[in-house]
Amino acid sequence: MATKHFDSENAPTVTREDLVELLNEDLAREYQAIISYVVYSQVLKGAQYMNIAAELEIHAGQELQHALMIAKQIDYLGGMPKVTPKPVKTSDKAEDMLRFDLENENETIRNYRLRVRQCEALSEYALAEQIRDILVQEQDHQIALATALGLEVPDVTKPQRR
Ligand SMILES: [Fe+2]
Ligand SMILES: [Fe+2]
């Protein structure tokens, strides 16, 4: 029944309990990323996709590191890391797979940007710092996928009005 308060940037002020829940959502997205990169990196076919397939394999390992970091933070906050990934879409078309990955990375970046601010609002500066480190890699993933698809890097800041 608690009322949510909003700061000037429209970032909801969260409690530590809220933060545990939100980090568990992030963890479910990391599991989703691990699974999709494991599968897509192996099934992507076509000469033009060989470079990106090798890159996706590297992403898979990085997503595992992110999952470990997020699980550690959940434990630090006194929560229990959840075990269920967000659903992973499948397709036999290379372009679809890359597009699904790009959409997921966009969503992940949007969430982590907000999470940094939420952690800082709770004075959890070290946690915010770790999420910033993850963000750097997620943005690299986003750029690699957009480039492979021949797209501009999506501006995920747009939905948040200034
Ligand atoms: Fe990740
Ligand atoms: Fe990623």
Image: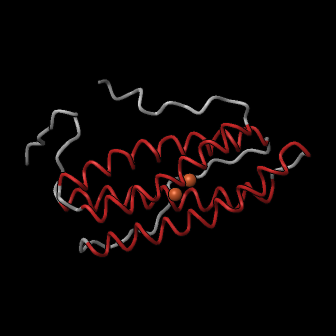
The colour mode here is secondary structure
Q: Quadrant of residue 123?
A: bottom left
- Please say if 70 is above or below 121: below
**Residue 110 vertical placement versus 161 (above, below):** below
* Left or right for 92, reference 146: right
Outermost residue on the left side: it is: 2
Q: Residue at x 22, y 56 (%)?
A: 18
Q: What x and y, as percent, mark residue 11?
A: 23, 40
Q: Residue at x 55, y 57 (%)?
A: 32
| Residue name at image x 53 percent, y 51 percent | 138
User: Where on the picture, by quarter, is residue 150?
Assistant: top right
**Quadrant (top left, top right, bottom left, bottom right) of the C terminus:** top left
Q: Please tell me which residue lies in front, 134 or 71.
A: 134
| Residue 3 x/y as whole percent | 8, 43
**Count of number-bearing discs:** 0
The image quarter in which residue 42 lies: bottom right
Front-most of 28 and 157? 157
User: Would residue 35 appear left or right of 148 to someone viewing this image?
Assistant: left
Counting from the top left corner in percent of width and height, residue 10 is at 22, 34
114 w.r.t. 149: above or below: below
The residue positioned 12% from the left and 42% from the top of the image is: 4
